[in-house]
Image (cartoon, rainbow, N blue to C red):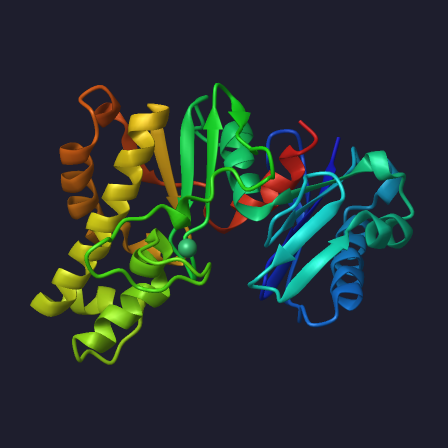
């Protein structure tokens, strides 16, 4: 049976139908502006309906429709705002139920990084104790412990990007705090370090310089890796996870970050916790879409 999936990104939307094995049998990808929330959701549903037509089924034939959201959500109905999409609080079901014409029991929501972790649990290498961390415009995170997603009391469990990793020269984070992982090891943080060092490149450009042997760029990637290692080691000492999966655009250059991640991790994590593997997700850009479908597993 197929499940409808909507990966509602802050800049790009992907929709698809996913079978039981995690194969995407029909998909649409489009840039959709987030400024008008109702317009955004309408476009998402239209794209999903195109996938449904293409597959020769109807919405009623699906197990349900799951949607990943680029912000905090209670996983049932409410979205508590999304800084990347510029959204405040609203009820997603009040938009999705009339647009889809399905009962609310057939519609499920999840935060996008939590969805990535659920996809890893259902379709990836998973295991039952792991963390998921993105290195992208921010550092999103999710925690799976004993086979369950850790949501927390107020749905903000697993916000790994705001672990404090720098106390001596902390940078201001988007959350209002100082010294967060996101302020020191996200794509924009790497770009800032480049600017401060007189290099006119973004994180991807910096990676190219590292590969070309530039010592300043190498030091910047080393520093970002050190911060990632600090955050992961603190988590490992609390959770004793088996694996850390790294996703997001900057994870394409994980090989450049991994030596300093590992060096810091192995120094700061307890001997037992240190056995954890740190690797790039194999789910690629489909992680969040597959996670939206995994809400019906
Ligand atoms: Zn922060």
Q: Which quarter of the image is occupied by the N terminus? A: top right
Assign ligand 1 to one image quadrant.
bottom left
The residue drawn where x is 20% and y is 53% is 256
Describe residue 215's horizontal placement relative to residue 68 as left or right.
Answer: left
The answer to whether residue 205 is visible is no
Residue 165 is situated, as x and y percent measured from the top left of the image, at 27, 49
Residue 93 is situated, as x and y percent measured from the top left of the image, at 82, 47
Instruction: Count the labels in the image.
Output: 0
- Is 239 rendered above or below residue 265? above
Residue 183 is situated, as x and y percent measured from the top left of the image, at 34, 60
Q: For this rendering, which residue is in front, 160 or 117?
A: 160
Describe residue 83's horizontal placement relative to residue 39 as left or right.
Answer: left
Describe residue 173's horizontal placement relative to residue 14 as left or right.
Answer: left
**Quadrant of residue 126 in the image?**
top left
- Is 34 rendered above or below residue 140? below
Residue 283 is situated, as x and y percent measured from the top left of the image, at 47, 42
Q: Which quarter of the image is occupied by the C terminus? A: top right
Describe residue 186's horizontal placement relative to residue 80 as left or right.
Answer: left
The answer to whether residue 178 is visible is yes
The residue drawn where x is 23% and y is 64% is 207
**Quadrant of residue 201 in the image?**
bottom left
The residue drawn where x is 77% and y is 46% is 55
- Is 266 rendered above or below residue 165? above
- Is 11 rendered above or below residue 162? below
């Amino acid at each position: 049976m197929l499940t409808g999936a909507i990966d509602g990104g802050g800049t790009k939307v992907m929709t698809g139908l996913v079978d039981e094995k995690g194969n995407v049998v029909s998909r649409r990808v489009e840039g959709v502006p987030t400024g008008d929330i109702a317009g955004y959701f309408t476009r998402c549903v239209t794209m999903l309906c195109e996938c449904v037509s293409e597959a020769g089924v109807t919405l009623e034939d699906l197990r349900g429709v799951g949607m990943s959201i680029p912000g905090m959500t209670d996983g049932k109905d409410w979205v508590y705002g999304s800084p990347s999409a510029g959204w405040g609080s609203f009820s997603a079901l009040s938009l999705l139920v009339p647009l889809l014409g399905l009962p609310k029991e057939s519609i499920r929501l999840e935060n996008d990084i939590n969805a990535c972790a659920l996809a890893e649990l259902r379709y990836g290498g998973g295991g039952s104790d792991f963390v998921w961390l993105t290195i992208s415009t921010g550092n999103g995170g999710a925690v799976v412990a004993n086979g369950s997603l850790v949501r927390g009391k107020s749905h903000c469990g697993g916000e790994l990007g705001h672990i404090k990793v720098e106390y001596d020269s902390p940078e201001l984070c988007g959350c209002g705090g100082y010294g967060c992982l996101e302020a020191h090891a996200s794509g924009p943080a790497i770009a800032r370090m480049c600017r401060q060092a007189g290099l006119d490149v973004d994180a991807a450009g910096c990676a190219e310089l590292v590969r070309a042997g530039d010592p300043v760029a190498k030091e910047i990637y080393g520093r970002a890796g050190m911060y990632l290692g600090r955050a992961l080691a603190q988590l490992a000492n609390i959770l004793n996870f088996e694996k850390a999966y790294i996703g997001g655009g900057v994870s394409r250059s994980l090989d450049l970050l991994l030596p300093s991640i590992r060096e810091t991790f192995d120094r700061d994590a307890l001997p037992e916790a240190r056995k954890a593997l740190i690797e790039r997700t194999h789910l690629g850009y489909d992680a969040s879409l597959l996670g939206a479908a995994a809400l019906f597993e």
